[in-house]
Image (spheres, grey):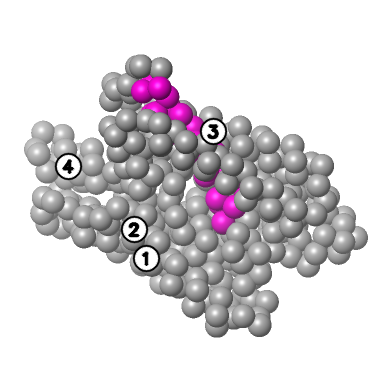
Amino acid sequence: MILLVALCLTFGLLELITGSVSIDFQSILSILGKNESESAQSVIIWESRIPRLFAAFWAGAGLALSGWIMQTLFRNPLASPSILGITSGASLGVALLMMSGFLIGVPLQGTLGTFTIAGGAMLGAVLVLLLVIAIASRMRDQVSLLIVGIMLGHFTSAIVSVLQFKTNPEALRSYVLWGMGTFTDTNYLEILLIAAIVAMGAIVIFFKKKALNILMLGDEYAQSLGVSVKKMRVVMIIVSGTMAGVITAFCGPIAFIGLAVPHFTRILLKTTHHATLFLPMILMGAAVGMGCDLISKTAEIPLNAVTSAMGAPVVIFILVKNAKSKALI
């Protein structure tokens, strides 16, 4: 815990220091202490770097919690926030919003604002989430539900591919840039919404940690101990899907954080107990989110390029190393 807290504080400080404009530590302390609003450095800190820091923190924590719950729910080490097609639903909502304007002769303009794009993403995520919940209430087999989620993701991706083929280059470019993921364009209102959803999801997970531990032993065993597996599944899908949906809406579809961070945390603490992992999972997700953003900012490359380049090899290594172990589940 001390290591993770120190890591988060270090990355948070580096988020404030690094950037195209160099601002030393002493100036940052002065700006934060006096709450200045006149100087150019103060504007950079308060309007750009602090929102980006908070967005990376809350998005990383939320995606980590969401992926952790998916892996517990499906008892599958490869489960992630996108496994139920929720991320693909958000991408479909944005694609329809950005590209349908061209199809009907009214190109999307920047004046519609970030909230319009986020609204389209959230609407797509919610519709897919409702569909998954309806299917989950009728299914007892988690593997079948997992396959349904994957198929929903492929179906929405097919629609997006058609829209990409039919749209104009400008709209296609806007969509591709959104799909790369970023913490740059978030404002305080958006961050407050992300933080509120993630905090509420974390509270639900905290109070359900005992039932989540029991779920890892199998549905039949959980039912024999009084856990309503079907109800628990629906609740956890809502919690995980809502967190992933709102983060995707404002920050884009960020890859691998929700898949890799739960593995990092379990290996670090050498346990699968949810009560023990709860706070470290949040801190590890936040640290990874800020760390990936720092690399993206410094190297001037897309965020998803960083998360994929770091996450994919690590997950492959973990799976190969633990091929015959149940420690991942």
Q: Residue 305 bears which disc, if any? A: 2
Reply above or below: 2 against 259.
below
Counting residues from the N terminus, which is met first, the one under dot 1 or under dot 4?
4
Asked if residue 146 lies left or right of residue 46, the reply is right
Residue 91 is inside the magenta segment:
yes
Counting residues from the N terminus, which is met first, the one under dot 4 or under dot 3?
4
Residue carrying label 3 = 124
Q: Can residue 187 be seen in this view?
A: no
Q: Which amino acid does label 4 sit on?
A: Ile
Q: What element carries label 1?
A: helix
Cα distance between the residues tagged 3 and 1:
27 Å
Nearest to the observer: residue 55 or residue 279: 55
Q: Can residue 170 be seen in this view?
A: yes
Reply above or below: 216 against 64.
below
Q: Residue 44 bears which disc, if any? A: 4
Cα distance between the residues tagged 1 and 4:
29 Å
Nearer to us of marks 4 and 2 is 2
Nearest to the observer: residue 201 or residue 254: 254
Cα distance between the residues tagged 3 and 2:
24 Å
